[in-house]
Image: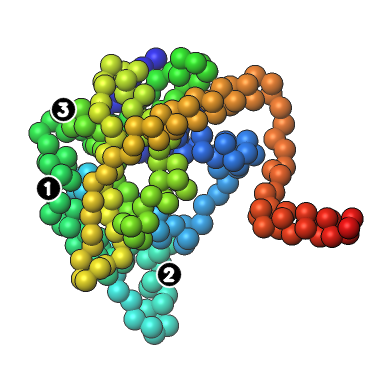
Amino acid sequence: MPQIIYDMPADEYHARPEMSNSNLKLFSESPARLVWARTAPEDPEKRRALNLGTAMHTMLLEPHRAHIDYVVMPKFGRKAVDLLAKKEWLDAHEQCCIITDEEQRKLQIMAKSVMAHPVAREMLESKGAVNESSVFWRDPDSGVDCRARPDILTWDVTLGDIKTTPDLKGFGNSVVDYRYYVQAAFYEDGLAANDIHTGPMQFIVIQKNASAGRYPVDVVALPDDLVEYGRRTYKRELCEYAEWQDRCEPVEATEQSIPNWFYKQIEDEMIGDIT
């Protein structure tokens, strides 16, 4: 079962049925959200933020695919004939990752900013480095088949991933909100199942908002105890997923969480009523 495919197209990888880190996050929220994510349609007009992330990854990891992975939208005027031409162009490129000329200019500067960082540059220019490999394995505890797609794997088995953030100082919040600590453990273990033992996952973090005319970059690794917590988290969730599949239970509504301050307000009012 363990396998690494180095030239699998992204679309083919994402169509695979194995459990991924992102799908496991959805399952942890509710099984219904996982089912929804596998079948819900996408609005191409609302994918702009994802398009920028795709283009950023392509510029840094697979620049030879730039003409394939995204297209730059020409500038159109505001006359009726121009608006018609724009609609026709968008219809013709409906399945493409579209960015504007200004967005391409910004992304090119951000990419150069990444290469100005010595650690990031060493990772990206490492001889024998493999980008966007597809990793498959079976989790030994749950029996669930899993998949991962590391951004970077260098010859000295450095595992790297590229992230963007509005503010470098707030990246710690993103680590929690987007469960990057779970991703780190999940990816490290997937490679270990294929007899590739890496060091701690390193994140190349790019600030999307300019500061003093530049786009700050940092390379960070997460604390070992946090990654270990991520490991326990994903292991537990994979077991829950396997049990859910075995029971063949129908998906159910998710219980809405309520802010703690409101529960405290209710408690205070009930105590007031009693006294």
Give the distance between the C-alpha atoms of the residues marked 1 and 3, in whole angstroms.
17 Å
Residue 236: x and y in percent read 54, 25
Badge number at residue 87:
2
Residue found at x 40% / y 64%: 90
In the foreground, 81 or 132: 132
Mark 3 lies on a secondary structure that is loop
Q: Earlier in the sequence, mark 1 or mark 2?
A: 2
In the foreground, 226 or 252: 226
Residue found at x 12% / y 48%: 118
Give the distance between the C-alpha atoms of the residues marked 1 and 2, in whole angstroms.
43 Å
Report the amino acid beneath label 2: Lys
Badge number at residue 118:
1
Residue 270: x and y in percent read 84, 56
Neighbourhood count class around disc 3 (C-alpha, 10 Å): few under 14, some 14–19, many 20 upward: some
Q: Do the CB atoms of the residues marked 1 and 2 lie less than 8 Å apart?
A: no
Q: Is residue 64 visible?
A: no
The quarter of the image holding the N terminus is top left
Q: Which residue is mark 3?
A: 156
Neighbourhood count class around disc 1 (C-alpha, 10 Å): few under 14, some 14–19, many 20 upward: few
Give the distance between the C-alpha atoms of the residues marked 2 and 3, in whole angstroms.
48 Å
Residue 121: x and y in percent read 13, 46
Residue 234: x and y in percent read 48, 29
Report the amino acid beneath label 1: Pro
Report the amino acid beneath label 3: Asp
Mark 2 lies on a secondary structure that is helix
The quarter of the image holding the C terminus is bottom right
Q: Quadrant of residue 247?
A: top right
Q: Quadrant of residue 82?
A: bottom left
